[in-house]
Amino acid sequence: MLILGIETSCDETSAAVYESSSAESGCLRSNVVASQVDLHAAFGGVVPELSARAHVERLPVVVSESLRLAGLSFSDLDSIAVTARPGLLSALLCGISFAKGLSLALDRPLYAVDHVKAHVAAAFLEFPSASLVESSARPINPGDLPVLALVASGGHTLMARQTSPLDFQLLGTTRDDAVGEAFDKVGQLLGLPFPGGPHVERAAASGDPSAFSFPVGIIRGAPLDFSFSGLKTAVLYALAKMPARERRRRTVDVAASFQRAAIRALSERAVTAVRETGIRSVVLCGGVAANRTLRQTLSSDLAAVGARLFVPPAVFCGDTGAQVAVYGSFLAAAGCPPVQDVDASTTSELFE
Ligand code: KG4
Ligand code: ZN
């Protein structure tokens, strides 16, 4: 079955074609991502109105390109999947309207995909082994389930138990900021370009992670919940105490110390979840999962408790049509009814 995945939940316009061969396996035929980073950089964050306009302009090109790269035409498609939630409403509606139009014009079923669940689905994608980091020698397959899914993105930070490609139970979530949001805010405080995450990682590579002792947020009575606002504020106060020249000189140390605390917060929850549930496989996904130090730290911390880490290649950690197409193929394979009328929502199904 050939399925087109469309993603417009935030600031990437993306489309991909996935060919499923059985219920949970298949091959990615194409994946095209048009990033809007340059568009939002001057504002230091995503501007929803600009994002929506760019999606409208770019979607026809991105979708056509995904078909061209797959060597297909519209009529070859068997179904269409689109991110319906969560995300920026104006951005989601662009992808949804486009996908609805295609579904009607081609008379093909349309599947509404949850963005957070789709991030986890990226770990099911099969890739040539050369593109995988040492911590993930192969993609996850249904035989590995149940797994613990640790989603670390700009909008979400949560831990869930995944019992089938479609079934998740939420174990813990953030009480305030998402970890990616904390990376971005710290990047902004350090005067680094938008989005802060990859730039903080780059700065941290030459800094001393023990230069500052930043707090790891703990929620009493909820060991799998996260909190990143205290960490962010601690960075703000540490910087406020420094004269401008010292601040510049110590940017790398602040970045490294912040990154260490943020990674500890994720890793400690993953180890606790392994101990509490007895589940020995953890999937790390979402934009922040591209962070190499996080991948390495989590991999070794999990190995120490007898658990293994699955993580998609870095290019499939961010927002892609690929994850939408894969999750859509899971919905189709499970016999889930296609939707006639897709509604956009700002909340993930995981919170219902
Ligand atoms: O999953 P994603 O692409 O979009 C959302 O669903 O939110 O995640 C984007 C987040 C941003 O906060 C970005 O700064 C962060 O992922 N990110 C990183 C890295 N690459 C992207 N954070 C830390 N290190 C990275 N290398
Ligand atoms: Zn995302």
Image (cartoon, helix red, strand yellow):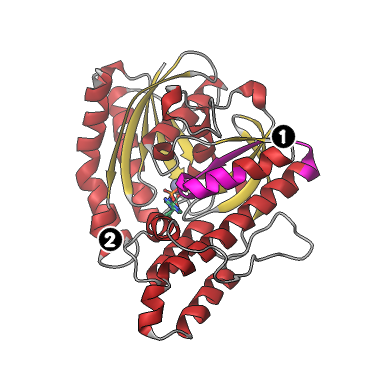
**Residue 111 is a magenta residue:** no
The crowding category of the residue bearing disc 2, from other C-alpha atoms within 10 Å (few below 14, some 14 to 19, many at least 20), is some
Instruction: Kindly identify which residue carries mark 1.
Output: 280
Question: Which tag is nearer the camera, tag 1 or tag 2?
Answer: 1
Q: Is residue 237 above or below residue 344?
A: below
For image coordinates 38% across by 74% down, the residue present is 249
- Which amino acid is tagged 2? His
Q: Is residue 58 above or below residue 236?
A: above
For image coordinates 48% across by 46% down, the residue present is 292
| Tag shown at residue 40 | 2
Label 1 element class: loop
Q: Position of residue 70 (x, y in %)?
A: 28, 21
Q: Is residue 327 left or right of residue 140?
A: left
Range drawn in magenta: 275-298
- Which amino acid is tagged 1? Arg
Residue 103 lies in quadrant: top left
Q: Is residue 228 left or right of residue 244?
A: right
Q: Position of residue 74 (x, y in %)?
A: 26, 22
Q: Residue furthest top?
A: 21
The quadrant in which the N terminus is found is: top left
Label 2 element class: helix
Q: Position of residue 113 (x, y in %)?
A: 47, 37
Q: Is residue 343 visible?
A: no
For image coordinates 35% across by 81% down, the residue present is 245
What is the CA distance from the residue labelled 1 to the residue labelled 2? 40 Å
Residue 324 lies in quadrant: top left
